[in-house]
Image: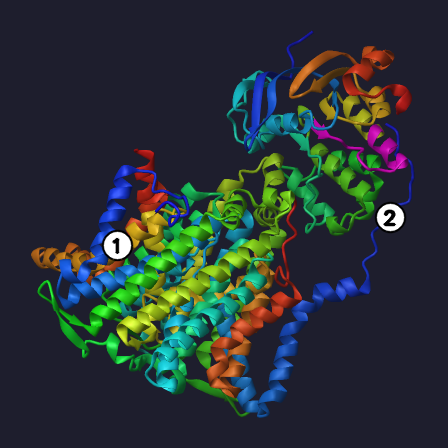
Amino acid sequence: MSAAPDHRPTFAAVSLSDRIGKAMPYLLIPLLVVVGFFAIGSSSSWLTLTVSGLAMGMMIFIMASGLTLVFGLMDVINFGHGAFISVGAFVGITVLLALSGWTGVPSLALNVAAVILAALAAMLATGVLGWAFERVIVRPVYGAHLKQILVTVGGLIVIEQLIHVFWGPDEIFLTRPETLKGAFTFWGAAIEKFRLLAVVFGLALFAAMLLVLKRTRIGLIVRAGVQNGEMVQALGYRLKLVFIGVFIAGSALAGLGGVMWGLYQEVITAGMGAEMMILVFIVVIIGGLGSVEGAFIGALMVGLLQNYIAFLEPKLALISNIGLMTAILMWRPQGMLPVVKAK
Amino acid sequence: MLNLLSGDRPRSIILTLILLAILIALALAPFLFPGVRSLETAARICIFIVLAASYDLLLGYTGIVSFAHTMFFGMGAYGVALASTHMGRGYDALIVGSLGGAVLAAILALGIGLFSLRVRAIFFAMITLAVASAVAVLVSQMSWLTGGEDGLNYLIPRELTPAFRFGEAFGVKLTGKLVNYYVIFGFSLVLFLLLLRIVNSPFGRVLQAIRENDFRAEAIGYRVVWYRTAATCLSAAIAALAGSLFAIWLRYVGPDTTLSFEIMLDILLMVVIGGMGTIYGAVLGATIFVLAQNYLQNLMGVASEATGSIPVLHELLSPDRWLLWLGVLFILSVYFFPSGIVGRLRAGR
Amino acid sequence: MSDPILRLSGVHTDIAQYHILQGVDLDVPRGGVTMLLGRNGVGKTTTLRTIIGHWQARSGTIHFDGADITAMPTASRARAGIGFVPEDMGIFTDLTVEENMVLAAISGPLDRKRLDWIFTAFPPLRTFWKSEAGNLSGGQKQMLSIARAMAEERKLYLIDEPTKGLAPAIISTMARALRDLKAQGASILLVEQNFAVAKALGDTAAVMEDGRITWTGAMAELAADTALQDRLIGLSMEAS
């Protein structure tokens, strides 16, 4: 066979401003942390708030990651995602309460085992629920955004009400397992053990998720599918199956986030999922619909900003997220890391 | 008559009869159904017809889902309440409050619209949800201005209150409450006819063209974002006026009665069940819904009592689980009756 | 002559309310290059998209390698042995060149020998193996798009305008690669506007007009008859 002529390979040069533009969202978090330091003044308060902001951000990210991928892959917008958060919390906390013999003793091993069991139960329940939700609620309305929004809102209401039917109308209070209670002091700052654990766990989960997305074939299919689903199918992959898998995984993660949020707040309500959805939506919008990394950055920013502002000007804490969203959308109307859609 | 309806006839004999029956029932409600509770129900129906119809302008005619409609509704209500509190009892306060609320609602809608509709229409649903919930929290936090969770009580002109009596007719005591009802009824009718006019104007037809195919509408030369934003503003202003009527009727506003997410769901349901994109659907949807809300919950109570021995069923039928059945109904209607009752009636003509 | 690798019989395809394909009958013989020619907008791209399954045929049948694939999902058609190079190239721009290729090898890891062959045909792909595909130039993206289809042996390749908007030097690279592919015994259905390329590569030709095939025959016959070209495609060899 003949060799191709040796025409000089050209490579579209990446300009400096392009590179900064790409890296900019990642730089926003350290920037926010530094600005927070100077605004707050006291280093111990700042450290406490930063850890709690990061913890909150990690939990929101866990809840948001599935939603953003589901949208990216199939253009499905699921307003019922919050239901998985609530169901996860109720199932997980029920298991935890049933294991009070394990959680009430100051044994790290037993405590952690109880939390892991609770998380697994929650993820199993919400994963199955997600599978059913996709089949019954979402599948008939593919490709129709208006109906998707309406029907998934309906699904959210029904599931929320069913929680009331099964667990009663009242909120459930709980206490964390013994060894996860309380705080320790570090550099003069009180840091709650659970929050630190949430940060570490969230980081590990994010790393694992990136690893799956970047290093495995299924991850490649998901990333490629978010960009150009048609082409993924033309190569020979059943995108629908991948999508259902992602939907189930995303629902399970939302359930996990629900358990963590319940442990964080030490109270759970049927409406907690719907409340969290507001933050989740803000996060996926500012991150860029379909982008896992964008959701991660967005979630951390929301968590940090809310904690800083709550300290500086408590009444503005909720508005701060809307302000953040407004600012980001003025800067990048498609969100920080928009997915480049083919077509 | 046709002119009043802007040439948009109900296009179904049964629908016409039902609409006429509702119109007559509402027009003569104080005399046909005497009693405080039924008048309360009638006024609520009038107001929710306007509210649902203004939402239909958005959902049905423009194809945009908003979760901020109660926010605009609340802005009108709080406008009247705040004006009446600070300007003192008087018609001027009612007018200033209503117009102020409507203008503010339109401006806020303009802001949200320009922001989110520019990018993609589904952003709008998420952003309105976020903004509306933030506003609801803000209202309950700023108690110095809004009365917080407790809301505001205020005085309205005496001629609109039960304390004002001026005789009796057909065995019904004529009081200011009656006058108030007819104020609500009259304004609701006018606003409804106005909406009918809007959707049947050239503007309304462009909206429908955009809903069917926004790329094509853009290609033909219509500025899609502009039209969508304009529809959002109009719909917000009319929702605010409905809120003002509500505030005049109740003489009280609070976050639960005007801003809650539950009311948002009620509106969604009214429009979907009545029939999206028909305006008349709002009349049917609101009427059925308010009646059901007031009377069906009693029935559920009875059913729940009767099934007291069966654990889960008893819970399912409890009046507190009213929303559960609404949700189920909602999903089913989106699947099976996307054109709602009006669509069914027109198809079965 | 053996039975065709692909046979379309009376295929109608609608896109939204538009009736694009109005009864396409087309045979693609085993081995060799079949050119699908015609003016812009006559339905060539829609024909390819209907074959791979991105559009569903409203009526008519599509047989591939003896099996009826009319109702099959796209992925199964691809796995049955159809490679597809779309008009817009369908590059996953956020993925690296390597990741694009890894995805294209559906039945396992990339075959080393095949990869060497691809690198010889398209040297820039080796140079930019670890780079994001979004940073490639237009010609390099087109190379990657074809290389992806070549990553596995497929029975039939559907290739939509591989030379569109490319510089002459790169066009000859493309033509060479396609000839290589053909030399390996592959069957190719090629949509091409560049008549010189069509003439050089094509064995048989089918010409479309208004959603139907109106002429089929040997490419050489069409290439020799300028009056026929003028009538069918609106351009003659002199013009190209």
Q: Quadrant of the C terminus of chain B?
A: top left
The chain identifier of the residue carrying mark 1 reads B
Position of residue B332 relative to residue B262, above or below, is: above
Of residues A165 and B348, the one drawn nearer to the viewer in this rendering: B348
The relative height of residue A46 versus residue C33 in the rendered view (above or below) is: below
SS class of the residue under badge 2?
Answer: loop
Identity of the residue drawn at 39% across and 87% down = B144
The front one of A313 and B1 is B1
Is A54 left, or right, of B251 in this rendering? right
Residue positioned 29% across, 65% down in the render: B184
Disc 1 marks a residue whose amino acid type is Thr
Determine whether, in the image, residue C86 is placed left or right of residue A262.
right
Q: Is residue B144 magenta?
A: no
Q: Which mark is residue A10?
A: 2
Location of residue C61 (image quadrant): top right
Colouring convention used in this rendered image of the protein: rainbow
Q: CA distance from mark 1 to mark 2?
A: 69 Å
Give the class, few, some or many, for how many residues have Cα within 10 Å of label 2's Cα (few <14, many ≥20): few
User: Could you say which is closer to the camera, residue C86 or residue A179?
Assistant: C86
- The stretch in magenta equals C158-175
Residue type, label 2: Thr
Q: Give the image location of residue C56, x and y in percent.
A: 54, 28
Determine which of the numbered discs, if any, sits on residue B96 in the image: none
* Both labels 1 and 2 in a single chain: no
Callout 1: helix, strand or loop?
Answer: helix
1 or 2: mark nearer the eye: 1
On residue B287, the disc is: 1
Q: Is residue C171 magenta?
A: yes
